């Protein structure tokens, strides 16, 4: 297991329930594969540096996890196809 720092941006037009569900779904990716969520920081809606998919704002979430390679690969795969995630990144801490 390695420690990772990640961040993703959720569409700003999502409701509170949709945002909470998206965060729970992405956290579940790591916990279901033996990982551990160390912290999750919801930064809320912030201005984007540039437009992404016609959005000028996004809901930022930063997190730290201990995860294996399988969980990291699944996180990338899900974030690429999940409707609400407009940007994501995960790097070794």
Image: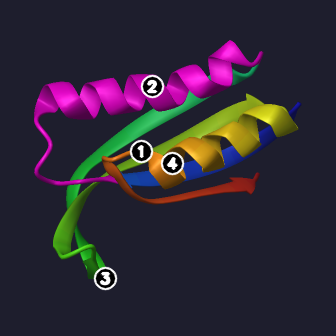
Name the front one of labels 4 and 3.
Answer: 4
Mark 1 and mark 4 residues within 8 Å of each other at the beta carbon: yes
Closer to the chain start, of discs 2 and 3, is: 2
User: How much space separates mark 3 and mark 1, taking CA atoms?
Assistant: 22 Å
Cα gap from disc 2 to disc 1, whole angstroms: 10 Å
Image quarter for residue 58? bottom left
Q: Classify mark 4: residues with Cα within 10 Å, few (<14), some (14-19) or many (20+).
A: some
* Residue at horizontal 10 percent and vertical 51 percent from the top: 13
Among numbered discs 4 and 3, the one appearing first in the sequence: 3
Say left or right for 22 vs 64: left
Outermost residue, front direction?
Answer: 81
Residues packed near mark 3 inside 10 Å, few (<14), some (14 to 19) or many (20 plus): few
Measured in 3D between alpha carbons, the distance from the residue under mark 2 to the one under mark 4, in whole angstroms, is 10 Å
Q: Which residue is mark 3?
A: 49
* Membership of 14 in magenta stretch: yes
**Which mark, residue 82?**
1
Secondary element at tag 3: strand
- First in residue order: circle 2 vs circle 1: 2
Task: From the viewer's perspective, tell me whether residue 43 is left or right of residue 7.
Answer: left
The residue wearing badge 2 is 25
In the rendering, at what x and y percent does residue 70 appear?
81, 34
Chain-order first, disc 3 or disc 1: 3
**Rendered image quadrant of residue 53:** bottom left
Tell me which segment is drawn in magenta: 10-34
Q: What color scheme is it?
A: rainbow
For residue 79, which numbered disc appears in the image?
A: 4
> Which secondary structure is most common in the magenta stretch?
helix
User: As drawn, is 22 to the left or to the right of 34?
Assistant: left
At 62% from the left and 38% from the top, the residue drawn is: 64
Q: Is residue 48 above or below residue 1?
A: below
Who's the residue at 18% across and 71% down the image? 55
């Amino acid at each position: 297991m390695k420690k990772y720092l990640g961040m993703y941006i959720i569409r700003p037009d999502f409701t509170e329930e949709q945002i909470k569900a998206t965060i729970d779904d992405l956290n579940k990716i790591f916990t279901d594969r033996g990982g551990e969520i160390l912290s999750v920081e919801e930064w809320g809606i912030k201005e984007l540096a540039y437009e992404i998919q016609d959005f000028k704002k996004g809901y930022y979430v930063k997190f730290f996890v201990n995860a294996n390679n399988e969980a990291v690969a699944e996180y990338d795969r899900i974030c690429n196809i999940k409707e609400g995630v407009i940007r994501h990144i995960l790097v070794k801490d």
